[in-house]
Image (spheres, rainbow, N blue to C red):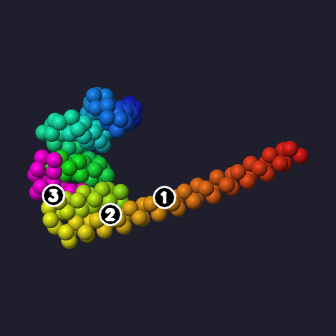
Amino acid sequence: DEQIHHKNAFVYLNLGDSYFRLQQYDSAKLYSQQSFDIASSNNDNQAKGLSLSIMGKVCSETGLKKIAMEYYRQSIAFSKIVDNIRSVSSTLMHTAKLFEIEGQKDSALFYANQSYKYSVESKFSDYVMYASEFLSEFYKKNGNKDSAYHYLEVASIIKDTLYKQQGVNQLYDLAFNEKNRQIEIKTASINAD
């Protein structure tokens, strides 16, 4: 029963996230709230943290900045309980962006640095890249060229690494597909005889 609730919470969570990406915020909020409700009835802190993060993003996009901030705060707390550092790092970054929009530079910098720190410690290259890009742009806007350059360089190195890995994976896929194609040709030839 607990496992079914967990799966149901994640089904609604994925629907909420999908609708968010499609910019259908009413549906995103509805499904994320359903995920949160199921997770709350089952004390599923992982699903609660992720649901709250999506609800925060929805509120941020729809102009409900104070509510978004509260959702982010709660999301980070639940995600820390279950040691979901990916979620913590992502939500910290969303929090930084929201503070920047609100003109609270010190808070934006604090949360972006926290996101960067968690990402580096956990070796989440994609999130290190996102935080680095944000920090580089932040420092550039605020006239700190040395720091801007440092984070730009970090982001650039990570991008190169990620894209190189994608390239290697694509080569493996091509080699695998070609090998299968050759096997199919041989099999067809044998069957034809």
Residue wearing tag 1: 166
Tag shown at residue 110: 3
Which quadrant would the N terminus be assigned to in this image?
A: top left
Nearest to the eye among marks 3 and 1: give it.
Answer: 1
Q: CA distance from mark 3 to mark 1?
A: 32 Å
Q: Is residue 111 magenta?
A: yes
Find residue 130 and report its horizontal and vertical position in percent: 30, 56
Q: With respect to residue 134, does 45 lie above or below? A: above
Find residue 105 and report its horizontal and vertical position in percent: 12, 55
Q: CA distance from mark 2 to mark 3?
A: 18 Å
Nearest to the eye among marks 2 and 3: give it.
Answer: 2
Find residue 12 and report its horizontal and vertical position in percent: 35, 32
Q: Which of the 4 image quadrants contains residue 151?
A: bottom left
Tag shown at residue 155: 2
**Residue at x 10% of width, y 51% of height:** 104
**Residue extent of the magenta highlight:** 100-118
Find residue 115 and report its horizontal and vertical position in percent: 24, 56
Q: Earlier in the sequence, mark 2 or mark 1?
A: 2
Q: Is residue 1 visible?
A: yes
**Is disc 2 placed on a helix, strand or loop?**
helix
**Residue at x 20% of width, y 63% of height:** 140
In front of the other: 37 or 96: 96
**Is disc 3 placed on a helix, strand or loop?**
helix
Q: Are marks 3 and 1 in contact (CB under 8 Å)?
A: no
Q: Which of the 4 image quadrants contains residue 64?
A: top left
Q: Which of the 4 image quadrants contains residue 71?
A: top left
**Residue at x 11% of width, y 57% of height:** 106
Q: Is residue 130 left or right of residue 142?
A: right
Q: Earlier in the sequence, mark 3 or mark 1?
A: 3
Q: Is residue 178 left or right of residue 5?
A: right
